[in-house]
Image (cartoon, helix red, strand yellow):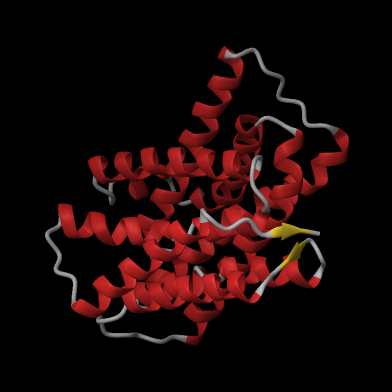
Amino acid sequence: MSDDTLSLMLVRFCVATLVFGLLLLVRRDRFKVPQAQRLPLALIGMLWSGGMIFYLLAVESLAVSLAVLIFYSYPLLVLAYSTITGRLKASPFLIGLFIAAFAGLYLALSGSAVRVDLKGVLLAALAAGGAAFTFICGARVAPTMSPLLMTFWVNAAGLLLIAPLMIDGIARHAATTGTMALALATLLYLIAILSQFEALARLPAARAAFLLNLEPVVSILLARLVLDENLSLLQASGVLLVISVIILSLRYRPTSA
C-alpha cells in the first residue's frame, strides 16, 4: 500500500471515529450496541472498511475507470441477492433500471486507456463484495439503532484494521499527502458514510445501493467543473443515462416480499 493510500485511510477512519464519537457524547447517546446486533455490526465494520482499503489498492494497480466500474457492480450484487432470497420481487422493469444504470457508468467512465492487472481486478471485486454485504446486512441492522452509533463503530473497526499498517511511523506517511486535499476528502467521506447508513435505516438494501450509482457521476461532474476536464459525447451520454434512470426509479415502487 502506498504512503498516500495509507495516509488517506488512516485520516478517514481516525477523524470519523473521533467526530462521530464526540457527537455521541454531546448528544449523551450510549455507545453500547444491542447484543443481537454486535456480530452483524462487527462484520459490517470489517468488510466495509476492508473493502475500502481493497478499493484504493485496486486503483493503484488498475486504470481508475476500470476499478470504479468493477466496484460499482455491487448494486447488481445486492439486487441479485435480494431477488434470490425473496426479499424483493424484481420485475423486468426494475432489473432493466439496474442494468441501464451500470451501462451508463460504463459509458461515463469510458474514453481513458485501460490498464488491466489480475491482482487489481481481484481487489476491486473483493471491495464490491464488501460493499454489497454492507448494504445487505446494513439494511437489517440500521433500523434497529442510531445511524450515528452505527457509523462510529464501522469507522472504529476500520481504524483497527489500518492501525497495524502504521508501524513504520505516522509522520512519514502524513507528509506525503496534501493537507487541503486530505481534509476535503475526509470531510466528504464523513458526509457520505453517515448519509449511507441514514439511507439504510430508511430504505431497502437494493434501493439504497441503486441510488449510490449517482456517486461516481457526481465525481465526474465535479472533475468537469473544478478541474476543467472535458467530457466526450459518449461520457456525457453515460452521465445523462445514469441520472435519468435514477430519476425514473424515484417514481417506481418495487414490491418487497
Q: How many marks?
A: 0
Q: Quadrant of the image for the N terminus? A: bottom left
Residue 177, position as x, y percentages in the image:
28, 49
Please give left or right for residue 52 compared with residue 206 in the image.
left
Q: Quadrant of the image for the C terminus? A: bottom right
Q: Is residue 61 among what the camera can see?
A: no
Determine the residue positioned at 40% across, 70% down.
59
Determine the residue positioned at 72% across, 38% down.
143
Residue 59 drawn above or below residue 257: below
Determine the residue positioned at 68% across, 52% down.
204
Location of residue 125 (image quadrant): bottom right
Name the residue at the front extreme: 251
In the depicted view, which residue is nearer to us: 79 or 253?
253
Residue 229 drawn above or below residue 170: below
Q: Is residue 198 among what the camera can see?
A: yes
Residue 133, position as x, y percentages in the image:
68, 60
Name the residue at the right extreme: 36
In the depicted view, which residue is nearer to us: 96 or 134?
96
Residue 99, position as x, y percentages in the image:
52, 76
Please give left or right for residue 251 compared with residue 45 in the image.
left
Please give left or right for residue 79 compared with residue 128 in the image.
right
Location of residue 231 (image quadrant): bottom left
In the depicted view, which residue is nearer to us: 202 or 215?
202
Residue 84, position as x, y percentages in the image:
78, 73
In the depicted view, which residue is nearer to us: 223 or 20?
223
